[in-house]
Amino acid sequence: MSYRSMKQLPIAGKRLLMRVDFNVPLDSEGFVVDTTRIEAALPSIRYVLEQGGSLILMSHLGRPKAEVDPKLSLAPVAKLLSHLLEREVEMARDCVGEAVQKRAHALQPGEVLLLENLRFHRAETHPEEAPEFAKELANLADLYVNDAFGTAHRKHSSNYTICSYFEGRAAVGLLLEKELRLLGEALSHPKRPFVAILGGAKVASKIGVIKSLLKRVDHLLIGGGMAYTFLHAQGIEIGNSLLDPDLVGLASELLKTFGEKIILPLDCMAAKECSEQAQAELFSFKEGISPEYQALDLGPKTQARFQEVLSTAKTVLWNGPLGVYEFENYAKGTENLAQYVSRLDATSIVGGGDLITAIHQVTLSRPFTLVSTGGGAMLEFIQENGNLPALSELKERSSNSL
Ligand code: AMP
């Protein structure tokens, strides 16, 4: 069963409620620092307006403690969105309640209302405690679209419970559709060679993904802090680098079973402490790292080896930075590889908040095929073979005809 696209909804003259992912970073003055997610939602938003519908947008922002937190208001997003759309985006004072209901019902075609942060209400993340919250949201509109990949691995009121109120009137947005299609294709019938790259700090959070990927890919390049548990499992001296002692046994087993597919770092830039000022030194893993040093980025031999493996790739899937990219000294491995992958004649899918931030530090010669807006959702999608909790319900409700 596949999802209904929003293009199959009769939008003209209707009020459409869209779950978007406007969970964007704000600076201390409340300005949006990274507009990627807002810009990614524009195609679906513009489509509704072109079709003559009115639009009610809803999202969460940050992690408020289930109460109003003015610092996490979506008002700055409404301002920015008004600018991008060149039309007024009205900011609602709440996401439910009589006033919002009244305003939503009075919307005219072409008008846009942004609801206030859904997570000011505990019911958003705990739908089982207050199912009427989803019903109240649903009462605002005639049609429902989910365009928020970033939260699709969570069963919340606005993306899961709400679907039951839109039987035959629910669909996926254009962004979500694209993310599902490209990720789904990469997992089910990738153009080969299929190379995955995994980085980031914690092996524990990605072990399920590693197992799933190893069954599908031709090569898995492992970088970032998680690589050192694998190197340690091979008996290599990793000094003071990140290590998950509980996973050494499993890493060893994976290396035994899938050894030929797994490509690990050959060298690294390491320092005595994880700081911008610390003097970076090059170590080869042939000799190992001195005990007081920790590996913080890929070395030149590793970069060359990773590029060699990637050179013939037709599909590249990448999650997680390959070094402590937050410090200029240790961002090179991630940045150089990003530049290299973007130039390949391949489908390139990158995801994860940290990796996207790292990539924004580079001027790429070509864009990636997909910069996925959801990090956790992308990992769960890979691990669960394309099944994301919120989307099961959306599939169900969008299958019946109107
Ligand atoms: P994750 O949330 O697991 O994707 O991890 C992202 C974090 O991994 C970033 O903050 C990076 O600084 C960090 N990271 C990447 N490589 C290393 C490394 N070699 N040592 C320590 N932290 C790292």
Image (cartoon, rainbow, N blue to C red):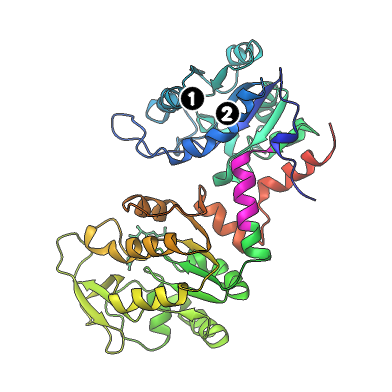
Q: Position of residue 241 (x, y in %)?
A: 30, 74
Horizontal arrangement in the rendering, residue 3 relative to residue 110 (left or right): right
Horizontal arrangement in the rendering, residue 55 relative to residue 260 (left or right): right
Quadrant placement of the C terminus: top right
Location of residue 347 by image quarter: bottom right
In the rendered picture of this protein, how many numbered marks are placed on residues?
Answer: 2
Query: Badge 2 is on which residue?
Result: 46
**Are there few (<14), some (14-19), or many (20+) residues within 10 Å of tag 1?**
few
* Badge number at residue 85: 1
Compared to 228, does 3 lie above or below?
A: above
Residue type highlighted by circle 1: Leu
Compared to 108, does 76 lie above or below?
A: below
Residue type highlighted by circle 2: Arg
Observer-nearest residue: 213 or 94? Answer: 213
Location of residue 254 by image quarter: bottom right
Observer-nearest residue: 259 or 85? Answer: 85
State which region is magenta: 172-183
Instruction: Tell me the quadrant of ligand 1.
Output: bottom left
Residue positioned 65% across, 60% down in the render:
185
Label 2: which secondary element: helix
Q: Are marks 2 and 1 in contact (CB under 8 Å)?
A: yes
